[in-house]
Image (spheres, grey):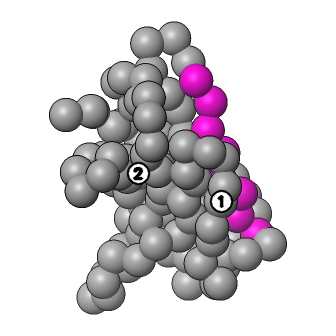
């Protein structure tokens, strides 16, 4: 099991930016995907953005053109990022980092993002 630790959430005004980070405790080899999901109060968890081991990316329609997912290999692990620009109140949610290897999924503990004036 890979440990995932998110950071970078917080309170931001509409139109502002945040950068989320997720540190994985191991370097993954082979075929996998890493992604960001979010869950707002009273709503189901939804996919925000995903990046494959080959580098291809996919975004929810609601964040296209505003959010950018990226990853980086770091010493003894990997880091996943989500650059969020032009934030809207509807982006308010707990954001979770996900690692998918085959049918196995690992999740982080989540980081709160609140967009409010």
Q: Which part of the image, by quadrant, shows the C terminus?
A: bottom right
**Residue linked to disc 1:** 57
* Res 17 → quadrant: bottom right
Residue tagged 2: 97
Q: Residue at x 46, y 50 (%)?
A: 33
**Which residue is at the front of the view, 113 or 100?**
100
- Cα–Cα span, label 2 and label 1: 15 Å
Would you say the magenta stretch is mainly helix, strand or loop?
strand
First-in-chain label (2 vs 1)? 1
Where residue 85 sits: x, y (%)? Answer: 75, 63
Query: Where's residue 95, x and y in %?
Result: 43, 61
**Foreground: disc 2 or disc 1:** 1
Magenta range is 66-73
| Label 2 environment density (alpha carbons within 10 Å; few <14, some 14–19, many ≥20) | many
Residue 64 placement (x, y as % from top left): 73, 75
Could you classify mark 1 by the number of other residues whose Cα lies within 10 Å: few (under 14), some (14-19), or many (20 or more)? some
Q: Answer left or right for 31 relative to 48.
A: left
Decide if residue 84 is in sight here: no
């Amino acid at each position: 099991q890979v440990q995932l630790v998110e950071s970078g959430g917080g309170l931001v005004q509409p139109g502002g930016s945040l950068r989320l980070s997720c540190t994985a405790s191991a370097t993954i080899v082979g075929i996998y995907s890493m992604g960001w999901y979010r869950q707002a109060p009273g709503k189901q968890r939804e996919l925000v953005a995903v990046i494959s081991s080959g580098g291809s990316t996919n975004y929810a329609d609601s964040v296209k053109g505003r959010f950018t997912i990226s990853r980086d290999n770091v010493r003894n692990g990997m880091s996943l990022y989500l650059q969020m620009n032009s934030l809207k109140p509807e982006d308010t949610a707990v954001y979770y980092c996900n690692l998918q290897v085959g049918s196995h999924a690992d999740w982080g503990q989540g980081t709160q993002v609140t967009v409010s004036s």
